[in-house]
Amino acid sequence: MSKKIVVIGGSAAGPKAAARAKRLDPSAEVTVIQKAPEMSMASCGYPYFVAGVFNNRNALLSTPYGEVRDPHFFVNTKGIVARTETEVLSIDRERHIVKCRDLNSDATDEIPYDKLIIATGARARKPPVPGIDLDGVTTLQSMRDADFLRSIRDEGTIKKAVVIGGGLIGIETCEALQLSGIDITVIEMLPQILMFLDWELAKVLENHVRSKAANVITDVKLAGFVGNNGKLTAVRLENGTELPCELAVLAIGVEPNTDLAKAAGLEIGTTGGILVDEYMQTSAPDIYAVGDCVEVVHRITGKKTRAPFGDLANLEGRVAGENAALGNSVTFPGTFHTGICKVFDFNAGSTGLSESRARQEGYKDVVTVINASLDKPEFMGAKLLISKMVVEGTTGRILGVQCVGPGDVGKQVAMAAMALLGKLRVSDVVTADLPYAPPFSLAIDHFIATAHLMENKLKGRLKGMGATELKGKLDKGEKPFLLDVRTPGEFDTMRLGIGETLIPIGDLRHRLNDLPADKEREIVCWCKISLRGYEAAILLEAAGWKNVKVLEGGVMAWPYRREK
Amino acid sequence: MSKKIVVIGGSAAGPKAAARAKRLDPSAEVTVIQKAPEMSMASCGYPYFVAGVFNNRNALLSTPYGEVRDPHFFVNTKGIVARTETEVLSIDRERHIVKCRDLNSDATDEIPYDKLIIATGARARKPPVPGIDLDGVTTLQSMRDADFLRSIRDEGTIKKAVVIGGGLIGIETCEALQLSGIDITVIEMLPQILMFLDWELAKVLENHVRSKAANVITDVKLAGFVGNNGKLTAVRLENGTELPCELAVLAIGVEPNTDLAKAAGLEIGTTGGILVDEYMQTSAPDIYAVGDCVEVVHRITGKKTRAPFGDLANLEGRVAGENAALGNSVTFPGTFHTGICKVFDFNAGSTGLSESRARQEGYKDVVTVINASLDKPEFMGAKLLISKMVVEGTTGRILGVQCVGPGDVGKQVAMAAMALLGKLRVSDVVTADLPYAPPFSLAIDHFIATAHLMENKLKGRLKGMGATELKGKLDKGEKPFLLDVRTPGEFDTMRLGIGETLIPIGDLRHRLNDLPADKEREIVCWCKISLRGYEAAILLEAAGWKNVKVLEGGVMAWPYRREK
């Protein structure tokens, strides 16, 4: 008798699990139940549809060769029954049955299963504030949301919008709407946007978003929505400010949809996601769960975490599909929280732990370095990359890498993700053999250069100082000697303006008299990206100064307001 | 007393070694001796200067902030003495002295060393054929060569050129000259260009080069150069053909410059490069050697090999500089032969072993798979990638990855290089957590998708057939049933035309009667990239056919002439 495999949820993880199960056991009867009218939506593509990067809505629902993934497609191509606009009411574990309701006819029926895969996803979090139901308050979570925001772009009547939440989806939505000609303000209750980045890198992004005429306000809390005749007119902050707008997009994160699982008595994990083991199996042996509704293992900390990413949903679905079809045979080892987003002309990505996350997780022995450099030679149209590497000091094991800038961030983070997968140490990366030719990278790739700086730091050769540390010292009234070693031309175009002295690196050897006579005085050196700054520090140390630091990332990674 | 460190060679590895040594021991007297007038040339950038991608010659000789790396720069910024246009005549190991000659004054002198670093590089190989000294026969190895070829572009009088050698430099030179409006023919004595690729991927590149109106002739040998009044008029092949041309660029590889080392009695390795250990130390304890003149360890095979790549020259220089300054403390572990090049609109890269190289090296248990897919979603402006992964069957360890296509090859090869560094197996990569967002990749990245196909193959689920195997069968008169499962529209635009039947994947379930009645008959399925081909194979196997194969990489990876 053929095995009955039922999948609840038809977005990303569900269809992948179903397809995998059917491929491995072609005799199985595989059914996918989906509440929405659409299936297999490329939901990460919504912001680009909203922004008008492309206009064909079906592109979000199609295979690469242009066939729409509707129930006909699933039956004909995959041999899978797909029931859309069908809600699952409950799971009867005793009888191995799923109770459903057809949203059009209201008819209910029961679908028996041998193996069940729950892929109920997540829903946008909604704060319990006044006015949340006003017309004009939305999320960007469903195809319907995408259609609504796209229609706003196409109609062109809305002038002002507020995005609530400066996370990944909030920032992508900000860009999409700004590109639609709408005046945007992003509000974020935390001190920074994009919490997967450390503060100083997030500020670089924030400055870029502002440079694109989208406003960003951090450290503010949403109080509620103000309306008139049921229509949104403003967003009210806890500090009393009202931001007039006709549209507000909530992007304060997602919550796993665990109601069905809970009602069926399945165990829920400490993070609020459905508890699964490495086989993606729930506390009930015949039930698997995958995608945004589960919690998984963080591969650095070993702790449970939620990782609602579209790529992981697919990989989890593939594992659960195989195990449901063939018995437990493959495992999903977890996440490094690898993520990336595009924000106007900048990209921002991260894998593993940020410094602040590492410290929260209790790591004591954390060493970090910031590296700013080009992604390829200047003569090939170079763009800037700013990376921060986080390592465990004693072992040199890489715990995480963040990277921001207009340059090729995707490659940097992909390499770093593979480095984490291989449990590599800094000493492994310093001699990595990467693909080099001028159209693709510098002779010493940015990633290797970051590892070189880190190695110098771990061996006590590079005494780096972060921008936040320097700013803190200055704010406290400390007076380190500040030394910019760029050319006068560079200094005229762009400078920090925090009391620094300019001595170009090429002149430094002959101008040591212009430096503090006190050899114990703290000196902080920098250049555009701090390679010359490092050179200067070595020169000054050789000349007898005892307390010389390098400002990591130089002018480019300075997250505060510059004089120029 | 300060340590005297002398470096012979001022291109890539030498200056890096010198700079590193001086940084780590600022009291050392560091001298670089360079025969050419220039220092620290970005020689990998020559083809792009010749092509007119940029016009500022100094960009090849400058730091990222625009300062020319001449002897003044080395003294002022680095504290290093650089002697250009100075030839080293010999190394006196007994007296720890290097004998030099000033090329301008012809004066000779002696420079004492405590530690010597040899970075004499490599020279373009020149075949002993008639006419080699004719005007118009050149290489692209030195700044002078680059100036000469650039002047040809600028003058615009030369109409026809022949590039001898279809390796990396030959192909880059081909592009550079073609972009300068010159009619190009590349001749290669081997059956394919770009030997770091397996034949079928190299053919895809070769077809692309031809599509750009540059001719490629493989399997032909150079007989000599024909001239008139000392000027080149044609290239003569061994088969008697003469290719009229006014310019011929020799690009048949490089030979390590080991004369000085040999004369000094240093050991030369089996591959012809200077023998060094993991500290980059030669057979003489006070002498290190780095860059294109040495041989290093291949990190997959463990054997010695030559790896004349600009990035490795820098990394080796960094290691030797540190060891020369501080005593042996860091090591250079070797190469994966990672390389990449841009060829018109295509990129081609590789890391680790190709299939043919693995077989040459004696690996018996080699499994390969070809994957063709997009680098990101269609709606984000996707481009094609074709990868071939080579693994050790029993362990699943990845031995090598090659990738070609207009897509983001650099990222693919960089990830693969990190995977090799981490000694990863296919089972590690199938659940890799990579940075996903639509501007950067597909939800299942091409690299992971390649690993998925490989996993299916290793587990016996995907029975793949390479294009060469299928072509071989057809040429032998075998008659497998050939099944293209794309849409009629796709079939009309582009098809192999080798006797295939078209049945779109969505119709296949209902048209099983159109397939061979004999369930033992071999069937080969494909689509554009063979995802649907795989789907079809599973469907047919489930329907009882016993011998169903998938054409790996589908239409896109077919290296032979297509009907359309």
Image (spheres, coloured by chain):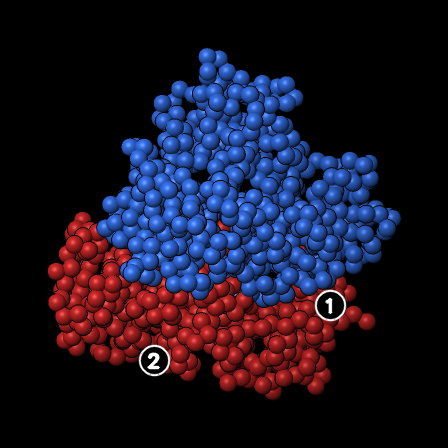
Chain colours: A red, B blue
Which residue lies at the image location 36% right of the left edge and 65% below the top edge?
A456
Image disc number at residue A129: 2
Q: Is residue B437 above or below residue A87?
A: above
- Kind of element beneath mark 1: strand
Viewer-side residue, A556 vs B240: B240
Residue A29: image tag = 1
Residues under numbered marks 2 and 1 in contact, where contact means CB atoms less than 8 Å apart: no
Name the chain letter of the residue that bears numbered label 1.
Answer: A
Q: Position of residue B328 (x, y in %)?
A: 44, 63
For the C terminus of chain A, which image quadrant? bottom left
Nearer to me, A432 or B409: A432
Horizontally, residue B426 falls left or right of residue B167, namely right
Q: Quadrant of the N terminus of chain A?
A: bottom right
At numbered mark 2, what does the secondary structure look like: helix, strand or loop?
A: loop
| Residue at the spot 78% in from the left edge and 38% down from the top edge | B474
Residue at the (21%, 78%) spot, across then down: A240
The residue drawn where x is 17% and y is 51% is A488
Tag 2 and tag 1 share a subunit: yes
> Residue A161: percent from the left, percent from the top?
30, 64
Residue A204 lies left or right of residue B133; in this view the side is left
- Farthest residue in the front direction? B94
Classify residue B87 as left or right of residue B535. left
Residue B29 in which image quadrant = bottom left
Horizontal relation, residue B24 to residue A411: left or right: left
Tell me how far mark 2 sits from mark 1, CA to CA: 45 Å
- Looking at the rendered structure, the number of numbered marks drawn on it comes to 2
Residue B149 in view: yes
Residue B86 tag number: none
Residue type, numbered disc 2: Val
Upstream in sequence: badge 2 or badge 1: 1
